[in-house]
């Protein structure tokens, strides 16, 4: 069974950095696009960083120049390096991946979410 497990969230002061990781496991044949979403209290979940199977990256304007998404194909892992964090970055962060598993069509899978809190 495919699982995405996130790690690396926590509390940081404004201007600080955090690094999130998301590792996929469980009968994986291939992984297409991977991405990071976040959901702040009272707001909709939003996609803010994505990376294709060819390592083409896209970012929302709100994080461009501060966040970097990368992937380690050998480890089925997507990483988010977050620098110059702001209080408005406070949210629950979720990883997402389009994964083809043995005997299954490609499907979107989600991590369990990790809290990122930026204090002013």
Image (spheres, helix red, strand yellow):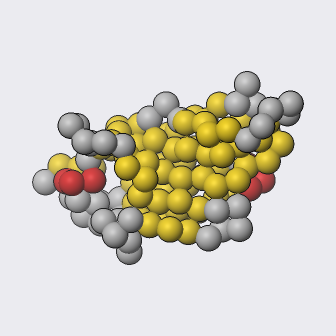
15 relative to 67 in the view: left or right: left
Farthest residue toward the front? 105
Determine the residue positioned at 38% across, 71% down: 64
> For the C terminus, which image quadrant?
bottom left
> For the N terminus, which image quadrant?
top right
Whether residue 105 is visible to the viewer of this picture, yes or no, is yes
Farthest residue toward the top? 1
Farthest residue toward the right? 103
Determine the residue positioned at 25% across, 42% down: 43
Residue 40 image point, x, y percent: 27, 42
64 relative to 43 in the view: left or right: right
Residue 96 image point, x, y percent: 55, 44
Q: For residue 44, which quarter of the picture? A: top left
104 relative to 35 in the view: left or right: right
Determine the residue positioned at 35% across, 59% down: 17
**Which sits in the foreground, 41 or 8?**
41
Whether residue 9 is visible to the viewer of this picture, yes or no, is no
9, above or below 53, in the image? above
**Which sits in the foreground, 107 or 9?**
107
Q: For residue 52, which quarter of the picture? A: bottom right
Determine the residue positioned at 80% across, 32% down: 104
Residue 88 image point, x, y percent: 21, 54
Farthest residue toward the bottom? 65
Residue 90 image point, x, y percent: 26, 47
């Amino acid at each position: 069974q495919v699982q995405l497990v996130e790690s690396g969230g926590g509390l940081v002061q404004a201007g600080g950095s955090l690094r999130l990781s998301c590792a996929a496991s469980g009968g994986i044949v291939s992984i297409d696009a991977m991405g990071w979403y976040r959901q702040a209290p009272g707001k909709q979940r939003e996609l803010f960083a994505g990376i294709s199977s060819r390592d083409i990256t896209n970012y929302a304007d709100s994080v461009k120049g501060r966040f970097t998404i990368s992937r380690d194909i050998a480890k089925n892992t997507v990483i988010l390096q977050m620098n110059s964090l702001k209080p408005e970055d406070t949210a629950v962060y979720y990883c997402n991946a389009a994964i083809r598993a043995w005997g299954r069509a490609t499907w979107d899978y989600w991590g369990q979410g990790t809290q990122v809190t930026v204090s002013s």
